[in-house]
Each structure stands twice: as C-alpha cells, then as structure tokens.
Amino acid sequence: AAMTPCDCATRRLSTGRAVRQHGAMLRILGKASSINVRKVLWACAEIGVVYEHESWGSGFRPTDVPEFLALNPNALVPVIEDENGVLWDSNRICRYLAAKHGRTDLLPAAPWPRAQVERWMDWQATDLNAAWRDAFMGLVRRDPAFADPGRIAAGVAKWNAMMAILDGRLAATGAFVAGPAFTLADIVIGLSVNRWLMTPMDRPALPAVAAYVRRLEDRPAWHAFGANGTP
C-alpha cells in the first residue's frame, strides 16, 4: 500500500468483497508487527473492511504523548476510531467489527455459540497470554529483566501446558477452536500458535495443533497477518 508522509496506509485484504463504510473510514492505530494489532488487521481482512492504518508504538510514533493518550489512557495499541467513536483492546475491537458488519459466521448472534467463541478468545487473552510472558520476553525480546534461565524454563513449561490444552480442544472439534467453522477465536488463537511456533524453545509434538495450522494455511489473511515471519 502507498504510504503517506504521516505513515498512513489505506489497506484491504479480503477473500471477497469490500465492506462499505458508513461515515468515516475506519482508522487503526498501532504498528503492524504487534500481535494485538495483527488481530484487528486479520479481522478486517476476513470481513473485507477498508481502513486507514497508522503505525504507533515502539520504533514508530510514541503512545505516551497527549494525542494518543486522549484515545487510550493505557498507552497501548491497537486503537480504532470510526463514526461511532474510539475503541481499544484488540479482542473487543474484533468483536465490535464482526458485530457491526453482521458477520455472524465469525461471531454468532445466538448466546450459546457466541459464548463458545468468546470463551476461547478470553482464554487466549488471560490464561494463554499469561503463560507465554516469561519465555517470550526472555527468548525473543531478550529483555534483561527476563534473562533468568530458571524463570525462562518455568515459562516454557507453562506455555507448553497451555498449548496442550489447546491441542485437546482441537482434537475434540477436529476443525477449529470454537467448533466446525472458522471464527474470531481462530484469529486470536491462530496468532498465538504462530508465536509459539516461532519462539526458539523446546516444544512437544501436538498433532491437533499441527493439523490446525494446515487448515489456517487455506486463508490468505493467515499468511498476511499470522504466519508472516513475525512472532
């Protein structure tokens, strides 16, 4: 996409049609290498939303400046803005966009199937996300605060244990995380699986996870925002 001097780009990657925006074009703030920003970019690709992307975060425009803090006082990416206002938190943004555009295949309207999707989205944001922190920060980010070998080893063990839970779930469904069809849960967990595979550490053989990755490979957005060389 062509870049402007303000480091903005208008992007669309979809498997079909574009979705017409009502009012202002969707604005996405956050650097594209961020796993949480990539959740939103992948969701937009699946929905077919045209958006304007601005790179904010380390290495780009800082998030601790008044302009950004007015949008998200937590100074975290991603943030979106559309005709309805400003929203932050990646999983919440994905749910909002799917609901806004009537994508009940990605986020069902009925309470029980919707709860299955949201259960695994929330699991990713809590149990799984917490499990990988020590290992990822020590092995990939090389953060000195996470350099202790014992702490890294414990983190690897916790991470692999969470992935074994996911393997059991995928073995049970035989397809995707929430059931037989691709949903928002597969966006957020697919990115987590990619991070697990790209972190230089010992991993157990998880055949259901391996089969799941092969299913994700059928989706163009997986290659653009999931397995794109960024953990």
Image: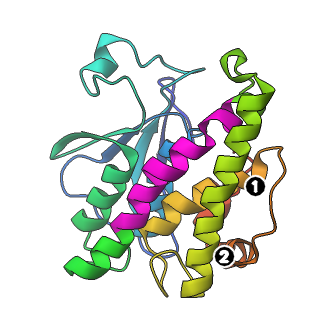
The residue type indicated by label 2 comes to: Tyr
Q: Secondary structure at mark 1?
A: helix
Q: For residue 197, which numbered disc appears in the image?
A: 1
Magenta-drawn stretch contains 126: yes
* Residue 164 position in % (x across, y down): 65, 65
* Count of numbered marks: 2
In the picture, measured across the screen, residue 180 lies left or right of residue 113, that is right
In the image, 98 versus 107, the foreground residue is: 107
* Residue 80 position in % (x across, y down): 32, 41
Q: Residue at x 20, y 77 (%)?
A: 111
* Residue 22 position in % (x across, y down): 19, 57
Instruction: Please report contact status of discs 1 and 2: CB closer than 8 Å, yes or no.
Output: no
Q: Residue at x 41, y 38 (%)?
A: 78
Magenta-drawn stretch contains 186: no
Q: Say which quadrant the C terminus sits in.
A: top right
In the image, 112 versus 84, the foreground residue is: 112
Residue 114 lies, with reference to residue 4, above or below; the image says below
* Residue 125 position in % (x across, y down): 44, 49
* Mark 1–mark 2 distance (CA, rounded to whole Å): 13 Å
Residue 110 lies, with reference to residue 37, above or below; the image says below
Residue on which disc 2 sits: 212
Q: Residue at x 71, y 48 (%)?
A: 157
Residues drawn in magenta:
118-137
In the picture, measured across the screen, residue 95 lies left or right of residue 199, that is left
Residue 230 in sight from this viewpoint: no
Residue 171 lies, with reference to residue 133, above or below; the image says below
Q: Secondary structure at mark 2?
A: helix
Residue 185 lies, with reference to residue 38, above or below; the image says below
In the image, 9 versus 215, the foreground residue is: 215
Residue 132 in sight from this viewpoint: yes
Dot 1: within a 10 Å radius of its alpha carbon, few (fewer than 14), some, or many (20 or more) residues? some
Q: Main secondary structure of the magenta part?
A: helix
